Image: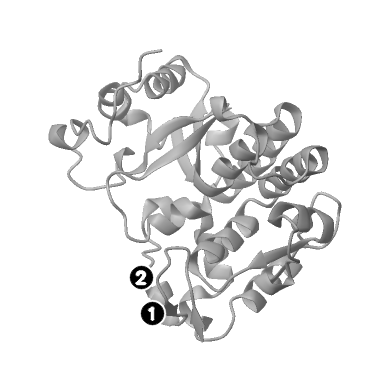
Amino acid sequence: MQVKPSTGRWLKLETSVFAAIDWARPWYRSVRAAAAAARVDTDFGTASIIPFFNAQAGARELCNHQGLPLAFVPQSALPEGVAYEEFIGATGGVPTRENLHDFFNALVWLSFPRIKRQLNALQAAQIALDGVGKSRGPARDAATLFDENAALLVVRGSEQGRALVQALRSHEWRRAFVELRQLFGNDAQVWLFGHALMEKLVAPYKAITAHTRVVMADDAYFALELAGQQAWLDGQLARELAQDGLSKASFTPLPVLGVPGWWPQQDDEFYSDAAVFRPKRKP
């Protein structure tokens, strides 16, 4: 079976495609458990990826924002002229192509179902309000950026935690990644959410940058086990999106390989690369 991934190259969907993914990389932590449950390493071959993900969606009783059961369906199920987000909201079906881009999208649905559900609710509501035009408009643009390229930065609500957030928003990269390096892990965690971002990181390069949403957490969050932290984050951010919506102003850029411990040789020369660690633009 020949499939065309989002990169535009043709490849055969076989085990070797998935073998290129290094699941030990820290940026795949957020979807690692879902990938293991779908038996990516052992069962994926030339067969469609859809049945594997539908088995997991059914076992987890996933649904869309209208309460309809979530199911991954072939891309051909999407009628011409119907927006992708609108279709998910109306039917519970997630059009899925046989490529890495949609593979990671399915993993994110399994890993952060409440955030994905609320994100789709925002997108579907905007389409119902404005229709499907040539441009998405600012609200749908923000939702699309989030869906495709978001990282979630969970920070302890302490003085140092707030200092880290301020340093990142001010593009004070050396302050954030060197002087406050010790905060990452115990007081700050990065969880990837965007499926296009995950696809890029199959073959990582230094300039990959996420649109990052900051989520403040208390001590109780950091005392949880990994699964408990992820469940808390899924619920907390879904509630925030329901209450506040989403805008591009809420994002801050994060060069992913600059996260302490996420790439070797993070020395002075590494962080001095102004093509990646760019200064903040003057207003």
In the rendered view, tell whether residue 9 sits above or below residue 28: below
Residue 231: percent from left, percent from top: 64, 46
Q: Amino acid at mark 2?
A: Ala
Residue at 49%, 44% in the rendered image: 191
SS of the residue at dot 1? helix
Quarter where residue 268 is shown: top left
For mark 1, does the 10 Å Cα neighbourhood hold few (<14), some (14 to 19), or many (20 or more) residues?
A: few
Residue topped by disc 2: 20
Q: Which mark is residue 52?
A: none
**Callout 2 secondary element:** loop
- Residue ranking furthest to the front: 134
**Along the viewing direction, whichever of 208 and 181 lies nearer the viewer:** 208
Outermost residue on the right side: it is: 67
Residue 1 image point, x, y percent: 51, 87
Q: Are marks 2 and 1 in contact (CB under 8 Å)?
A: yes
Q: Quadrant of residue 177?
A: top left
Q: Residue at x 57, y 61 (%)?
A: 107
Instruction: Specify the quadrant that holds the C terminus.
Output: top left
Q: Which residue is mark 1?
A: 16
Residue type, mark 1 in image: Ser
Q: Residue shown at 53%/21% (left/top)?
A: 157
Distance from the alpha carbon under mark 2 to that under mark 1: 6 Å
